[in-house]
Image: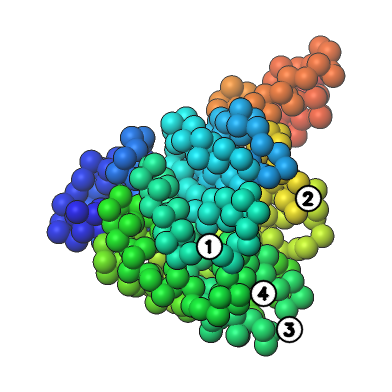
Amino acid sequence: MTRIESARQGRITDEMRDVARAENLAADDIRRLLAEGKLVIPKNRKRGFAPTGIGEGLKTKVNANIGTSQSRCDMAQELRKLDTAVQAGADAVMDLSTGPGRSDMLHAVLKHSPVMVGTVPLYNAAAGYLEAGRDCAEITSDDIFRAIEDQAASGVDFVTVHCGITRHSLSVLEGCGRLMGMVSRGGSLTAEWIRKNERENPLYEEFDRLIEIARAYDMTLSLGDGLRPGTIFDAEDRAQVTELIILGELTLRAVSAGVQVMVEGPGHVPLSMIANDIRQQKRFCDGAPYYVLGPLPTDIAAGHDHIAGAVGGAIAAAAGADFLCYVTPAEHLSLPGIDDVREGVIASKIAAHIGDLEKNIAGARTRDRLMTEARGRFDWEAMFGQAIDPEKARRLHDRADHPGADPDACSMCGDLCALKTWERAVSGKQSP
């Protein structure tokens, strides 16, 4: 029996109780939202870790991507990135490895990670064909589903599957006049397969087969956005909307079968369109959790895309996005390093919290209130405790560039501290 089926029968499981406690919500609210497909708890039956919920009424969660590439393959380095991401507050990691030793890398991540783990199984299948000197279009339907089942059996908690790339959605794409075409790796591999084989996408055509694998492990399906816009000029075109409609139909099929589903979203989107994009997804996909990359409201922030992503992510989270995939300073440029991972997670955590403030998520405003009170009494330790990045806050405050500084002020204002001046103004005390 899957989590959705338990929820529909009125059973409140230990996992639902754990999520309810973490979110300061009633356990029956978690059960109801899970039964309706508006909340997921991505946790493979084969893994043991504290469950996390994603969806309506819950804190906005953050994912960090790690993994080797064909040009850079250092398992120890990727595991350090995993530790860095979790320490910075990531709620999930995705292993997107395409380099040699991918299976060993995934097993190490699953063993090492204290948070949920996702993958894109098609990457593993495609990389194997490339290593053998074969065309990715030679991949068989059985190869694709074998990769999915192997990763599910390994314990993967959620998988990205590009089911909305179909012969129809590709025909719509061809008439859109896009500037960037397709920027999704999994989506483009699927499109190439469809074109060269002149057949329908197996993940769409055999969706029931995918459902059965997910049911067996209670693994969450993350329906990938293969037609997401790669530039703000392609946002909300007919191709993107066509894929979203297909994903909405597949969401209903999966949830009806007792399988948990998230839907992935763009991408590069102008600021004015982000909130509507979220509302549109929620409407088409019956309120299923929305997992967004960024989104990025500008195309020219190379080297600082984590900042652009935080701006877009805050708007998206406030409008109802449930899960933010981090963007690092290395986005569009290179495989991220450890510092990039940390910066990306922190930027997305800030965006997620801003969104939670706007959604009035339980506990979000309390944290800001505690920070305000700590600032008012110059309680630096309490301020560090409430900061999203306590380590950096402490380091900036304590750096030795102001010898003899007043411990009750920062080195920016010193004796001209506005709070101290105001205190004297209302108390009638003289300046020192």
Give neighbour class at mark 4: few <14, some 14-19, many 20+ (Cα, 10 Å). many
Does the CB distance between marks 2 and 4 fall below 8 Å?
no
Looking at marks 4 and 3 on the same chain, the residue that comes earlier in the sequence is marked by: 3
Q: Is residue 174 visible?
A: yes
Give percent across and percent down for residue 81: 61, 33
In this orientation, does residue 371 appear? no
Please tell me which of labels 3 and 1 falls first in the chain: 1
User: What residue appears at the point 66 percent right and 36 percent down from the top-left corner?
Assistant: 73
Q: Are marks 3 and 1 in contact (CB under 8 Å)?
A: no
Measured along the vertical axis of the image, is residue 212 above or below residue 176? above
Left or right, 55 with respect to 30, comes to right
Query: To which residue does mark 1 refer?
Result: 139
Return the residue at label 2. Answer: 333
How many marks overall?
4
**Label 1 packing within 10 angstroms: few (<14), some (14-19), many (20+):** some
Q: Nearer the viewer, residue 378 or 363?
A: 363
**Residue 177 marker:** 3
- Residues tagged 2 and 1 counted as in contact (Cβ below 8 A): no
State the CA–CA distance, disc 2 to disc 1. Answer: 29 Å
Task: Give coordinates of residue 160: x percent, y percent.
Answer: 49, 57
Secondary structure state at the residue bearing disc 1: loop
Three-letter code, disc 3: Gly
SS under mark 3: loop
Q: Quadrant of residue 428?
A: top right
Q: Is residue 432 left or right of residue 252?
A: right
> Amino acid type of disc 2?
Leu
